[in-house]
Image (cartoon, rainbow, N blue to C red):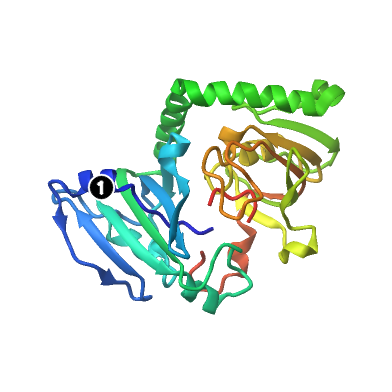
């Protein structure tokens, strides 16, 4: 998942007040970054959890666009502090951080295209850049402490946002109209995504924290296909592997999978605030405030990360319903 961000100028200006500003440096992997730090806080330790705010921005052909933002989503993001890093990646900066720090990192799309031309998103163009800025709001000693704070923060922000709640209700009515008679058999996630199971599996139920593998095809309600790991025209046919409840996917997609068992096939309909909301990804197939429809098959559920068994000792580990 690409996790590259840029704070709006007004917010960034506030971050600089009272901080010791350092010039741009380069990580060992060659990524330019600027660390804006406040004195007094201890450096984060491996296995602690960070609460951060960020905005994702790209610049292509001289035009800037926001790709993702915790401000637009109405909730911060939680992530583990790890000593494992990948070159030319934001993970190289995490071990340097303290509570209250802010980071700006600028990356060249050319580098990603050169290294993995078949893996980059279609909106990556030569000469383009990704800019990452994040701020560390808090640090927690355990994942459980971070999870408790996350639940409180998201619940308060989500329920308190009148605009979001109104949009969800409007989208839910459109979804019910789209489903017609099958709406009666649909399940609903706590936040409002609709799930219609079309074929029952017999495996384990997916739970938050589990590692899952999913086959999917994504469309708009108008039938425009925007991504698939089944249709070979999208050039990625491996199952989508991720951990539930970690913010790695769109909120509505993540919550929907938690209603399924291994082997289930289902149709998932996500109100726009639980998908991309106003921040539609570049490319034009998904518009702002677009309801998304996914036909999914939950192929695998595991309590342990199956990918960890494939990583050689000492190696560092590091589409589309992703939240990127």
Residue sitting at 54 percent across and 66 percent down? 124
Relative to residue 220, is residue 122 depicted above or below?
below
**Left or right: 99 with respect to 62?**
left
Q: Position of residue 247 (x, y in %)?
A: 52, 44
Q: Which percent across, then down, holds residue 91?
A: 40, 62
Q: Could you classify mark 1 by the number of other residues whose Cα lies within 10 Å: few (under 14), some (14-19), or many (20 or more)?
A: many
Relative horizontal placement of residue 46, taking residue 13 as reference (left or right): right
Residue denoted by label 1: 99
Who is closer to the viewer here, 318 or 57?
Answer: 57
Residue situated in front as seen by the camera: 204 or 34: 34
Residue visible at 80% across and 59% down?
231
Q: Residue at x 17, y 63 (%)?
A: 22
Note whether 80 is above or below 253 in the view shown. Answer: below
Q: Position of residue 304 (x, y in %)?
A: 61, 53
Residue 242: % across, % down: 61, 52
- For the N terminus, the quadrant is bottom right
Residue ranking furthest to the bottom: 114
**SS state under label 1:** loop
Q: Quadrant of residue 267?
A: top right
Residue ID at (59%, 27%): 191
């Amino acid at each position: 998942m690409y996790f590259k961000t840029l704070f709006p100028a007004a917010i960034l200006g506030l971050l600089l007040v009272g901080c010791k500003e350092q010039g741009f440096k380069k990580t060992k992997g060659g990524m330019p970054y600027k660390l804006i730090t406040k004195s007094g806080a201890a450096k984060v330790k491996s296995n602690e959890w960070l609460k951060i705010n960020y905005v994702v921005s790209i610049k292509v052909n001289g035009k800037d666009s926001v790709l993702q933002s915790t401000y637009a989503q109405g909730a911060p993001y939680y992530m583990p502090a790890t000593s494992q890093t990948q070159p030319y990646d934001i993970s190289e900066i995490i071990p340097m951080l303290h509570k209250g720090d802010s980071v700006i990192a600028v990356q060249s799309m050319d580098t990603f295209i050169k290294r993995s031309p078949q893996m980059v998103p279609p909106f990556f163009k030569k000469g383009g850049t990704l800019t990452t800025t994040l701020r560390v709001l808090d640090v927690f000693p355990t994942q459980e402490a971070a999870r408790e704070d996350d639940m409180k923060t998201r619940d308060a922000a989500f329920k308190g946002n009148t605009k979001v709640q109104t949009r969800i209700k409007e989208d839910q009515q459109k979804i019910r109209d789209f489903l017609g008679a099958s709406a009666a058999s649909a399940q609903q996630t706590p936040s409002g995504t609709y799930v219609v199971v079309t074929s029952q599996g017999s495996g384990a139920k997916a739970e938050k924290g589990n590692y899952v593998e999913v086959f999917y095809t994504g469309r708009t309600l108008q039938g425009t296909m925007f991504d698939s790991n089944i249709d070979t025209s999208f050039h990625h046919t491996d199952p989508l592997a991720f951990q539930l409840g970690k913010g790695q996917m769109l909120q509505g997609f993540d919550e929907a999978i938690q209603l399924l068992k291994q082997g289930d096939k289902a149709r998932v309909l996500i109100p726009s605030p639980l998908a991309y909301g106003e921040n539609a990804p570049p490319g034009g197939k998904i518009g702002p405030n677009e309801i998304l429809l996914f036909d999914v098959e939950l192929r695998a559920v595991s309590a342990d990360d199956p990918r960890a068994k494939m990583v050689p000792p000492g190696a560092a580990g590091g589409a589309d319903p992703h939240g990127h």
